[in-house]
């Protein structure tokens, strides 16, 4: 009898563990890329006063530059925000990060106002592709790495990368512009390097979407509430609109207010203030993980309803402390409310349409970023910034009341079928 040597192959469990670890590493790689991209899009915020001094344009033009970015986001969400559901997450995420790199190159060219507008538009086009794609990618990597586990890690990391990244970009840019040579070039150079690293990280991450052999015919993003819970989806998008209205207002108005009305031209201070608002939002998102969805909605609405009037008082009295405290409270509310919206949409949407559902949410949210910022910019040509902010505060309070009504109706509509099912049983 001869003895044969058996070379054992890898056990199925070992292969599964390896795959799980790859998806776990990929989760953090995508989170890093997401955070870097979102941080890059707020790099210009503390630098606007420098552009204004160099090129001589007004606060109104700053809001236009900011709005051009948001318009780019909306166009991208309409045209490409949902396509990763068909072709895979990486095939959208890598080109989107490459667009951010192109925008960085435009900023580094020492741009005039027209080039600045083009750079912001290109950056917006990239971010529109990134937001929904990266959020869906993170959820799928989390589910593969930790099947059956709570969604809290995904929700915390995705919203922290999104909202926290916005604050990190402004802080890093402000500090670099204050203490390093070439303040209008160095921040973009640093983020160009980080974007290259992010592209490599995404390329090494496993794909989570199996590309369809027969792809559906292309169509732009539909704005549809048909994602399993129509009333819940409408309420979530309204919450996204209200949240981004506050974020957009603060990002576009705060640096000019600090440099102008408060006579504090420090770029580091402007970046720190923007960071404080978005940082407060990110921390609040982390600390509210264990709250129920309705509790998050109530907290978000209440904090915004309190914070924006306090911010308004700070503007009318030229009081930095009141302005900052109000901004942070409003940021906490906007962050928690937006987190509840993302979690609700990601839960209700079918996997094959998750990217589409999230793209729709971000599309409505970015419309909330555009309209109030441009509205205030236009209003300041006829009235003072304080008067324009007073109008905005009144409109926001009405909007928040509307969001509360929508969530209440959504909850009632979900209870009614459940009660009917029990009665039928």
Image (cartoon, grey):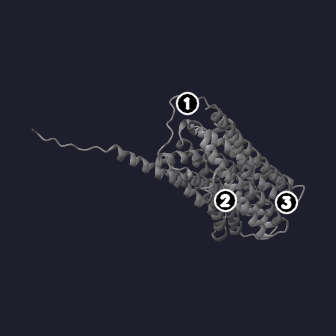
Of 207 and 378, nearer the camera is 207
Q: Which mark is residue 215?
A: 1
Residue for badge 3: 385
Residue lying at 75% horizontally and 57% vertically, measured from the top left = 302
Q: Residues within 10 Å of mark 3 (few under 14, many from 20)?
A: many
Q: Residues within 10 Å of mark 2 (few under 14, many from 20)?
A: many
Secondary structure under the numbered disc 2 in the rendered image: helix
Of 306 and 16, nearer the camera is 306
Secondary structure under the numbered disc 1 in the rendered image: loop
Secondary structure under the numbered disc 3 in the rendered image: helix
Q: Pointers 3 and 1 in contact (CB under 8 A)? A: no
Frontmost of labels 2 and 3 is 2
Q: State the CA–CA distance, disc 2 to disc 3.
A: 25 Å
Where is residue 115 drawn, in percent x and y? 70, 52
Q: Is residue 149 visible?
A: yes
**Rendered view: 370 above or below 84:** below
Q: Which mark is residue 281?
A: 2
């Amino acid at each position: 009898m001869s003895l044969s040597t058996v070379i054992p192959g890898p056990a199925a469990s070992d292969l599964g563990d390896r795959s799980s670890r790859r998806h776990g590493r990929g989760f953090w790689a995508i989170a890093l890329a997401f955070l870097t991209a979102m941080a890059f899009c707020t790099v210009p915020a503390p630098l606007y006063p420098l552009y204004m001094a160099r090129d001589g344009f007004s606060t109104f033009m700053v809001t236009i530059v900011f709005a051009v970015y948001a318009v780019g986001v909306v166009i991208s969400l309409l045209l490409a925000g949902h396509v990763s559901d068909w072709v895979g997450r990486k095939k959208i995420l890598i080109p989107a990060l490459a667009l951010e790199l192109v925008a960085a190159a435009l900023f580094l060219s020492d741009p005039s106002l027209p080039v600045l507008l083009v750079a912001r538009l290109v950056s917006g086009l990239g971010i529109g592709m990134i937001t929904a794609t990266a959020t869906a990618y993170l959820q799928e990597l989390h589910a593969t790495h930790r099947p059956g586990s709570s969604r809290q890690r995904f929700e915390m990391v995705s919203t922290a990368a999104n909202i926290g990244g916005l604050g990190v970009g402004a802080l890093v840019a402000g500090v670099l512009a204050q203490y390093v040579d070439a303040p209008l070039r160095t921040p973009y150079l640093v983020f160009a390097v980080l974007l290259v690293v992010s592209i490599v990280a995404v390329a090494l991450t496993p794909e989570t979407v199996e590309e369809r052999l027969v792809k559906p015919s292309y169509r732009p993003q539909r704005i549809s509430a048909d994602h399993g819970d129509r009333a819940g989806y409408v309420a979530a998008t309204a919450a996204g609109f209200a949240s981004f209205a506050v974020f957009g207002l603060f990002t576009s108005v705060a640096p000019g207010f600090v440099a102008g009305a408060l006579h504090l031209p420090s770029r580091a201070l402007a970046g720190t203030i923007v960071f404080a608002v978005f940082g407060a939002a990110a921390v609040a998102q982390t600390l509210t993980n264990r709250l129920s969805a309705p509790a998050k909605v109530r907290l978000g609405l209440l904090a915004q309803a309190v914070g924006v009037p306090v911010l308004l008082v700070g503007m009318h009295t030229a009081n930095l402390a009141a302005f900052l405290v109000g901004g942070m409270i409003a940021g906490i509310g906007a962050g928690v409310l937006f987190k509840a919206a993302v979690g609700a949409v990601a839960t209700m949407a079918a996997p094959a349409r998750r990217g589409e559902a999230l793209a729709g949410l971000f599309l409505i949210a970015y419309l909330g970023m555009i309209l109030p910022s441009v509205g205030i910019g236009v209003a300041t040509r006829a009235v003072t910034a304080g008067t324009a902010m007073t109008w905005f505060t009144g409109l926001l309070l009405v909007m928040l009341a509307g969001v509360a009504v929508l969530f209440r109706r959504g909850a009632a509509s979900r209870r009614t079928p459940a009660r009917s099912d029990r009665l039928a049983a």
